[in-house]
Image (cartoon, rainbow, N blue to C red):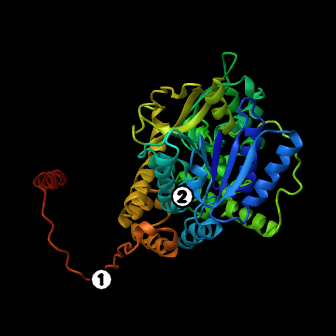
Amino acid sequence: MKIAIIGAGSIIFCKTLILDLMATPGLEPIEFALMAPSTRRTPQVEAFVQRVIAANGLPHSVYVTTDRRDALRGADYVIATFQIGGLEAWERDYAIPLKYGVDQCIGDTLGPGGIFRALRTIPVAIEMARDMEVLCPKALLLNYVNPMAMVCWALGKTRVPFVGLCHGVQTTLDLIAGYVGVPKEEIDYLCAGINHMAWFLKLEHRGRDLYPTLRARFEQPEYYANEKVRGETLRHFGYIMTESSGHLAEYLPYFRKNKKALDLYCDEPAFGGESGAALKWSKAVAARYEGRDLLVGEPSILPPRSIEYCSYIIEALETGRVSRLNGNVINGGMITNLPPDCCAEGPLFVDGAGLHKTVVGDLPPQCAALNLTNINVQRLAVLAALEGDPEAVVHACALDPLTAAVLTLKEIREMAAEMLEAERVWLPQFEGKAIRPTPTIVIPPNVQRAPVPVDPALAIMARMSELGKGA
């Protein structure tokens, strides 16, 4: 089979997925097509893969290309891992909102950073999907590109079969297993919602509900200190959700809106909430390894497969071995109290016949309500990305929970306008378009207010109130 990796310059992640696939029995032989716009990093991946193939006597092959159509032609599977604009765009996603007072930790899923990443990414994802419709119409697209929900929502408007993949469920399950003292392989769970905000609706071990133990752990300081934001959402909304506290703090209005909240909840290590944590880490790594081969010293022995779902999906489709996972798809009734056209994350089963959604039903109302605050932003950002509508950009930013907790509407418009101008090089759909400014209206101290039409019902109520005072 042929597997095209679009965005193969993402060295470490690309290496992980390829090793997983080469370690999967029943997929031989695979031709890997590594595509990136330049050959600055992909030759490193190619040399590493060839070294692993030779060391293990594998029948696979690999080649590098800068032509996306060449990589896609005849592919059986397409894996997307690209990032439009790289660190330069990410820096602007973070620095400009921070200037206005919107403090982001990661900035790749929601918030101003996530919105503008979607604006840059969705047109490229749609172009890739249109190429797939012609060059590999039966290929499955496995999307790892963020912002996951927005990109997949847009992909749902094409004819390309796809699934969006993340590891938030797996890593959160590791945390839960450690807190409740049960091996994660023995935990029976149901998790559903949206990407980076999916809820563990059921946690059981041999029929025993694990939630009482988990809730008790989060009341202990030594456990709570590790995951304050996730702990607070569990305490107040009743369920634990996927994604780390650093990420989660960006999707809700409670934790990053001012210094008091940041100091109280966002002081955890390892991306627990530090301002610009992921960007700073990525820049440090890039500087450390500039001009060096990151994979030159990596061992050639095939390791055990990672937690990433990709290889298990392809294995199930090719061999019929059933695999269970959580994936991102167009909702279509999977979660009945979320919009049918949104991108939802829920339990899927995969076998030789394809990917199969399960019907979750309603989320607890408070969980669905929190998801909807993010879905509203996603809908408007997808609209803005596909139609090049600058006003939809403002609307998406204005409905973002964190941004709305910090800025006025006028400030939000000014921030969005500055970001659009700063990122135009990656936003061709906005050529010749700009966000409309709104002037400040100065009200003189002794202004004579314009007459206001009086609602008859209100006038009657006011009169009755006066009469009551007289009595």
Give how far across and how far down residue 119 sits, in percent.
48, 61
Among the 4 quarters of the image, the one containing residue 350: top right
Give how far across and how far down residue 174 sits, in percent.
74, 36
Three-letter code for the amino acid on which mark 1 is drawn:
Pro
Foreground label between 2 and 1: 2
Three-letter code for the amino acid on which mark 2 is drawn:
Gly
**Mark carried by residue 146:** none
**Mark carried by residue 114:** 2
Q: Nearer the viewer, residue 165 or 180?
A: 165
Q: Is residue 134 left or right of residue 240?
A: left
Residue for badge 1 = 445
x 73%, y 44%: residue: 18
Q: Residues within 10 Å of mark 2 (few under 14, many from 20)?
A: many
Residue 374 appears in the figure: no
Q: Is residue 143 left or right of residue 274?
A: left
The N terminus - image quarter: top right
